[in-house]
Image (cartoon, rainbow, N blue to C red):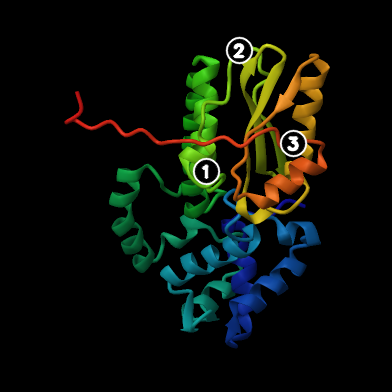
């Protein structure tokens, strides 16, 4: 069965507390899950944000609303018990307890009046027959805004030229901790027809990328080989470089690359893939000064 909404949980919760004893919320959650026929999968279902278990969260919200109506009282951290008013309510044998039912109690009305201003300002409220808790409603609104923004950004990126996209990818990777610095990994890596950027995804996370850069007659450079620090030393670099090399050979071109002399690990990897040192090259950084003519 589906996870019941928090208002449906209110009556079973109050009935369980009807013995007058003090109970922990953890105990209440476990017992109500069994009494309401939840499957093991239902008991593990998460909120959209994955920040909490949905059923656990709804039980806590049901207990919160019952406390605001003074049908339940808090006796300690994570511990509750029924009040005298709660026992009187059970004595009437209600068919359902929900927000509309709780509005007969002045303490609950006062609580609602104190929250209505905030609800009207942020657009998040709880209707009498709402199935989602206020927290779930807020999360859903947030996730919807994120999806809308992500789609808008994607639409804009799709309209940009390939060179901008490749620069965007490298800037993003550097910001995420790949490749060290913009100087190390953020070189312009693409030209038209270069097969773009290859990447490896592990457990829904991008862990390594490689691209192509300079092309000179029969030569094509393998460039911007970057790996997330947590995955350095794995096989990802080898797989990506080998894949790029095979693509270049398929075009009857010869692959080449540059590597810092101090990067011994990368040199060993490239030598295993068949690369050989052709020559050492010196690089200089030229700084422009406002005093130079």
User: Measured from the top left, where is residue 281 in percent x and y?
Assistant: 57, 35
Assess disc 1: are there few (<14), some (14-19) or many (≥20) residues with their C-alpha within 10 Å of its C-alpha: some
User: Measured from the top left, where is residue 217 in percent x and y?
Assistant: 68, 11
Pair 1/3: label in front? 3
User: Measured from the top left, where is residue 211 in percent x and y?
Assistant: 65, 29
Whole-angstrom CA distance, mark 1 to mark 3, is: 38 Å
- Residue at image coords 49%, 59%: 101
Nearer-the-camera pick, 109 or 253: 253
Pair 2/1: label in front? 2
Placement of the C terminus among the 4 image quadrants: top left
Q: Is residue 123 left or right of residue 28?
A: left
View extreme (front): residue: 279
**Do tag 1 and tag 3 residues touch (Cβ < 8 Å)?**
no
Task: Count up the numbered dots.
Answer: 3
Q: Secondary structure at mark 1?
A: helix
Residue 192 has which mark? Answer: 2
Sequence-earlier tag: 2 or 3: 2
Residue 275 has which mark? Answer: none
Which residue matches tag 1? Answer: 140
- Residue at image coords 69%, 51%: 265
Whole-angstrom CA distance, mark 2 to mark 3, is: 20 Å
Q: Secondary structure at mark 3?
A: helix
- Residue at image coords 50%, 29%: 168
Assess disc 2: are there few (<14), some (14-19) or many (≥20) residues with their C-alpha within 10 Å of its C-alpha: few
Nearer-the-camera pick, 157 or 77: 157
Sequence-earlier tag: 1 or 3: 1
Name the image quarter holding residue 245. top right
Q: Secondary structure at mark 2?
A: loop
Residue 240 has which mark? Answer: 3
């Amino acid at each position: 069965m589906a996870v019941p909404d928090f208002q449906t949980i209110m009556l079973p919760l109050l009935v369980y507390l009807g013995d007058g004893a003090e109970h922990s919320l953890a105990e209440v959650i476990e017992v109500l899950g069994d009494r309401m026929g939840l499957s093991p999968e239902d008991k593990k279902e998460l909120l959209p944000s994955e920040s909490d278990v949905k059923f656990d969260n709804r039980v806590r919200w049901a207990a919160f609303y019952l406390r605001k109506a003074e049908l339940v009282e808090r006796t300690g951290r994570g511990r509750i018990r029924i009040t005298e008013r709660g026992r009187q309510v059970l004595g009437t044998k209600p068919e359902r307890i929900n927000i509309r039912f709780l509005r007969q109690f002045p303490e609950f009305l006062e609580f609602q009046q104190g929250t209505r201003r905030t609800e009207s300002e942020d657009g998040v409220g709880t209707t009498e027959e709402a199935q989602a808790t206020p927290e779930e409603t807020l999360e859903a609104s947030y996730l919807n805004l994120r999806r809308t923004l992500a789609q808008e950004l994607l639409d804009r990126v799709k309209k940009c030229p390939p060179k901008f996209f490749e620069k965007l990818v490298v800037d993003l990777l550097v910001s995420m901790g790949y490749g060290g610095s913009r100087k190390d990994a953020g070189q312009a890596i693409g030209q038209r027809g270069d097969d773009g950027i290859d990447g490896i995804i592990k457990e829904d996370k991008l862990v390594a990328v490689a691209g192509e850069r300079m092309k000179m007659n029969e030569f094509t450079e393998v460039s911007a080989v970057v790996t997330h620090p947590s995955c350095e030393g794995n096989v990802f670099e080898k797989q990506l470089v080998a894949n790029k090399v095979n693509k270049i050979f398929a075009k009857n071109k010869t692959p080449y690359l540059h590597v810092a002399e101090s990067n011994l690990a990368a040199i060993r990897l490239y030598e295993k893939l068949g690369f050989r040192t052709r020559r050492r090259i010196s690089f200089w950084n030229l700084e422009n000064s406002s005093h130079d003519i």
